[in-house]
Amino acid sequence: MAASGGESGRASRTFTNAARRAQIVAAAIDTIAELGYAKASFARITERAGLSSPRMISYHFADKDDLMHQIVREVFTAGAEFIGGRMAGEETAAGKLRAYLEANLQFLRDHPREMLALTEIGPHARDADGAPYTSRSAQEPSLRGLAELLAAGQRSGEFREFDVVSMAVVIRGAVDAAAVRLRGEPALDVDTYGRELVTTFARATEAGR
C-alpha cells in the first residue's frame, strides 16, 4: 500500500530534521576541536555548518548544553558499538581484553577530532540536575564491564588472581590517557601506544605470573 501524502511529508520532515541535526553536531565537533569549548559559540558553529542563522541551531537544540550532550551521546554510542563489535568476535577472556584495548585505541586514532571535542567538553559537562560530571562517574559503566570481563577470565583460569576493580581502573586510565595526548606535540603515536598497552596488560593479567 502506498504511503499517504501526509505520511510521506512527515517522513520527509523527519529525515530532513535528522540530517540537519547531524550537520550541526559535526560542525560543533569541528569547531570545539579547533577553537576549544569556550570559543565554540552558536555563531561560530553556524558559520562552520554553512547555516544562515544561529536560530537554525536553536530550533534543534535548547541551548549549548543540549548540543554538548548530543555530541557526547553520539560519540560514546559510536565508540561502544565499534568496541563491542570487535570484542564479540573473540571467544576467550584474554581475546576480549586484547580486542577491547585495540578497538579503543583504533577508535581514538580514527576519530581524533571527536576525542579532542570530548576532552574539551568534559570539564563543562553537566548531568540532568545541573551537577558537573566527574571522571569517576563518566568511567563507571566501562569499569563495571571491564571488571566483569576480568572476573570471567579469572574463573576460566586465563587470568591470575588480582583485584578486578583495581585492574579495571588501571586499564581504563591507560586508555583515557591516550585521548588527552592527541593534541600534544609531537602527537602521540597511537598505534605504538596500543601495541604496548596490549603487551603490558597481557603480561599483567596472565595466569602463572
Image: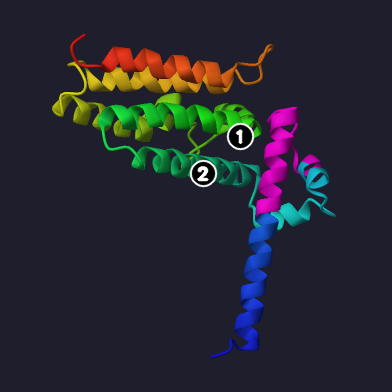
Q: Can you say whether 14 is above or below 64 in the image?
A: below
| Residue 160 image label | none
Q: Which image quarter is the C terminus in?
A: top left
Report crowding for label 2: few under 14, some 14 to 19, many 20 or more residues within 10 A (C-alpha). Answer: few
> Magenta stretch containing residue 31, yes or no?
yes
User: At x 70% / y 41%, what residue is drawn?
Assistant: 28
Residue carrying label 1 = 111
Mark 1 or 2, nearer chain start? 2
Dominant secondary structure, magenta: helix
Residue 145 in view in this figure: yes
Residue range in magenta is 22-44
The answer to whether residue 128 shows anywhere in this view is: no
Q: Residue at x 49, y 31 (%)?
A: 132
Q: Is residue 53 magenta?
A: no
Picture quadrant of residue 203: top left
The answer to whether 152 is drawn above or below residue 85 in the figure is above
What amino acid is found at the position of numbered circle 2 in the picture?
Ala
Q: Amino acid at mark 1?
A: His
Left or right of residue 46: residue 134:
left
Residue 42 or residue 196, whichever sits in front: 196
- Give residue 138's position: percent from left, percent from top: 43, 31
Residue visible at 37% across and 38% down in the picture = 87
Q: Secondary structure at mark 1?
A: loop
**Colouring rule applied to residues:** rainbow
On the image, numbered disc 2 is attached to which residue? 78
- Where in the figure is residue 177, as x and y percent of width and height? 50, 18
- C-alpha separation, residue under disc 1 versus residue under disc 2: 10 Å
* The quarter of the displayed image where residue 191 is located: top right
